[in-house]
Image (tube, helix red, strand yellow):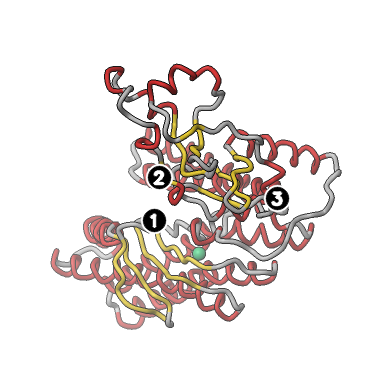
C-alpha cells in the first residue's frame, strides 16, 4: 500500500503502518474519551477519560494486529508465503500468496475473525471481572468497549462477502463443493458486490438520518463493492483465459509503420492504417516500439514535416511483449504498464501479431460462451497460481467503531 512505513516485524512478518492508521487511533480515541466513557462511567476527570481513551484505542489497534497475525501465522503453517501486514484506516491487510487447497483457504480466512471473537469475549469477561471485583469503572468501560468492538469486528468480517474473511470462507466451501476454484471466486465476489451495495444503501440512509456512523458504513461499502468487482473480473479473466496461448487471441497480420516516416507523411497515408496504435519497424522489418495516432496528431501542423514518427514512439523496452505460445492469462497478470492492454507478439525478433483490449474481450466472451455450453476442452482450471495476490491482497476492512 502506498504511503506505508515499515515499523518492524511481528512473528517474523514485516509490519507496516499506513499514514491513515494513526488517524483511526485518533478518531476512535476521541469518540471513546468524549462520549462513550463519560456515558459508561460518569464522574471522572477529563484527564482520566483522555488517558483511558488513548489506551483503549491503542488496545484496539493491537487487537487488529493480532487478527492479521492469526491470518499470517496460519498461512505460513499452510506453506503460503506471507509478504507483509499493513494497518490502515479501515483495519488491516495481510498480503500473501495463494493457498492451494480449499481447506487451507478456510483455515487461513477463519483464523482472523475467530481471533477477534476470542479477544472480544476475553475483553467483555475482563470488563465484568474488573467492574465487580475491583470497581475500577473507567478501566471496565474501556475493556467493555474494546471487547464489543472486537466482537463486532469478528462478526462483520464473517459476512459472506469477498474480500472480507467470510467471503473467503464462502469461496472455500464452494470450491470444495464444485472443485472449480475460479467459479467459487466469482460467486464470492458477486456476493461481495451485493453486500457492498447493501452497506452503501444502509449507510446512506443512516447518514441521511443524521448518524455519522452511516458515513463509515458507506465508506466500507464503497471499498467492498470496488474490491469485489475487481475479484469477479479477475476470476472471469482467469477462468476464461488460463491455458489459452497468446497466438489464439492475437490479431495478425499487423499494420506496421516504418519508423523513419515523417508525421506529415503518416497523415498523408493515414487512411490506409486502421488502428489507433501502430507498431513501428526499422529498415530490416524488426519492431522498435509503438506509437499512438493521438500522439502523432498532437504535433502542430507546421512541424509535421520535420518530426519522424520514431521520435514520438514508446520504445520496445517499455512495451508489453509476449511469445505466441505464452499463456495469455499469465502474460496479462504480470503486466501493469500503461500499454498493458496492447501486447506485441514476437516470434524471435519478428512481429507476428498484436493483442488489444478488444481481442481480449472477444476471446473472453467466446470462452465464457463455450464454458456455458459445456464445450470446453478442459485446458483449465487449476495449475499453479499467479501473482494475483501480490496485486490484490486479502483486504478485509476490519473496522471498528
Ligand atoms: Zn481478516
Residue at horizontal 50 percent and vertical 60 percent from the top: 393
Residue that mark 2 sits on: 219
Using residue 169 as the reference point, say whether residue 202 is left or right of it. Answer: left
Question: Is 395 or 279 nearer to us in this picture?
Answer: 279
Using residue 314 as the reference point, say whether residue 321 is left or right of it. Answer: right
- Position of residue 366 measured from the top left corner of the image (x, y, whole percent): 74, 37
Residue that mark 1 sits on: 90
User: From the Cβ of disc 2, is ligand 1 less than 8 Å away?
Assistant: no
Calculate the distance from the C-alpha at mark 1 to the C-alpha at mark 3: 40 Å
Of marks 2 and 1, which one's residue comes earlier in the chain? 1
Residue 208 appears in view: yes
Helix, strand or loop at label 3? It is loop
Residue at horizontal 61 percent and vertical 60 percent from the top: 168
Q: Which quadrant of the structure image shows residue 293?
A: top left
User: From the Cβ of disc 1, is ligand 1 less than 8 Å away?
Assistant: no
Residue that mark 3 sits on: 245
Residue 36 appears in view: no
Q: Which quadrant of the structure image shows residue 12?
A: bottom left
Calculate the distance from the C-alpha at mark 2 to the C-alpha at mark 1: 9 Å
Q: How many marks overall?
A: 3
Helix, strand or loop at label 1? It is loop
Q: Are marks 2 and 1 in contact (CB under 8 Å)?
A: yes
Question: Is 165 or 393 nearer to us in this picture?
Answer: 393
Using residue 118 as the reference point, say whether residue 128 is left or right of it. Answer: left
Of marks 2 and 3, which one's residue comes earlier in the chain? 2
- Position of residue 343 measured from the top left corner of the image (x, y, whole percent): 56, 44
Q: Which mark's residue is nearer the viewer, 1 or 3?
A: 3
Residue at horizontal 35 percent and vertical 68 percent from the top: 60
- Position of residue 159 measured from the top left corner of the image (x, y, whole percent): 57, 55
372 above or below 333? Answer: above
Amino acid at each position: 500500500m502506498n504511503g506505508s512505513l515499515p515499523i518492524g516485524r511481528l512473528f517474523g512478518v514485516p509490519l507496516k503502518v499506513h499514514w491513515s492508521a494513526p488517524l483511526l487511533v485518533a478518531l476512535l480515541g476521541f469518540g471513546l474519551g468524549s462520549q462513550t466513557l463519560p456515558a459508561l462511567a460518569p464522574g471522572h476527570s477529563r484527564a482520566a477519560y483522555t488517558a483511558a481513551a488513548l489506551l483503549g484505542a491503542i488496545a484496539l489497534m493491537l487487537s487488529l494486529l493480532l487478527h492479521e497475525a492469526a491470518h499470517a501465522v496460519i498461512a505460513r503453517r499452510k506453506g503460503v508465503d506471507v509478504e507483509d501486514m499493513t494497518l490502515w484506516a479501515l483495519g488491516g491487510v495481510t498480503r500473501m500468496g495463494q493457498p492451494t487447497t480449499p481447506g487451507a483457504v478456510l483455515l487461513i480466512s477463519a483464523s482472523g475473525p475467530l481471533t477477534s471473537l476470542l479477544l472480544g469475549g476475553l475483553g467483555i469477561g475482563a470488563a465484568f471481572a474488573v467492574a465487580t471485583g475491583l470497581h475500577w469503572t473507567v478501566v471496565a468501560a474501556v475493556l467493555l468497549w474494546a471487547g464489543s468492538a472486537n466482537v463486532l469486528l469478528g462478526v462483520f468480517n464473517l459476512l459472506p462477502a469477498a474480500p472480507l474473511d467470510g467471503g473467503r470462507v464462502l469461496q472455500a466451501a464452494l470450491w470444495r463443493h464444485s472443485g472449480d476454484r475460479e467459479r467459487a471466486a466469482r460467486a464470492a465476489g458477486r456476493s461481495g458486490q451485493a453486500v457492498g451495495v447493501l452497506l452503501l444503501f444502509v449507510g446512506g440512509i443512516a447518514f441521511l438520518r443524521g448518524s455519522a456512523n452511516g458515513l463509515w458504513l458507506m465508506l466500507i461499502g464503497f471499498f467492498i463493492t470496488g474490491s469485489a468487482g475487481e475479484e469477479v473480473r479477475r476470476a472471469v479473466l482467469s477462468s476464461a483465459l488460463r491455458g489459452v496461448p497468446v497466438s489464439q487471441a492475437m490479431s495478425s497480420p499487423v499494420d506496421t509503420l516504418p519508423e523513419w516516416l515523417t508525421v506529415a507523411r503518416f497523415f498523408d497515408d493515414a487512411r490506409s492504417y486502421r488502428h489507433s496504435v501502430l507498431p513501428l519497424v526499422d529498415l530490416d522489418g524488426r519492431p522498435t516500439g509503438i506509437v499512438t495516432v493521438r500522439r502523432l496528431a498532437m504535433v502542430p501542423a507546421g512541424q509535421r514535416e520535420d518530426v519522424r514518427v520514431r521520435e514520438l514512439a514508446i520504445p520496445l523496452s517499455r512495451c508489453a511483449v509476449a511469445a505466441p505460445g505464452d499463456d495469455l492469462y499469465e502474460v496479462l497478470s504480470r503486466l501493469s504498464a500503461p500499454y498493458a492492454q496492447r501486447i506485441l507478439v514476437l516470434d524471435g525478433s519478428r512481429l507476428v501479431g498484436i493483442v488489444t483490449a478488444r481481442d481480449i474481450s472477444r476471446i473472453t466472451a467466446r470462452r465464457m460462451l463455450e464454458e456455458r455450453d459445456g464445450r470446453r476442452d478442459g485446458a483449465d482450471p487449476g495449475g499453479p497460481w499467479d501473482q494475483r495476490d501480490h496485486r490484490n491482497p486479502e483486504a478485509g476492512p476490519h473496522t471498528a467503531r
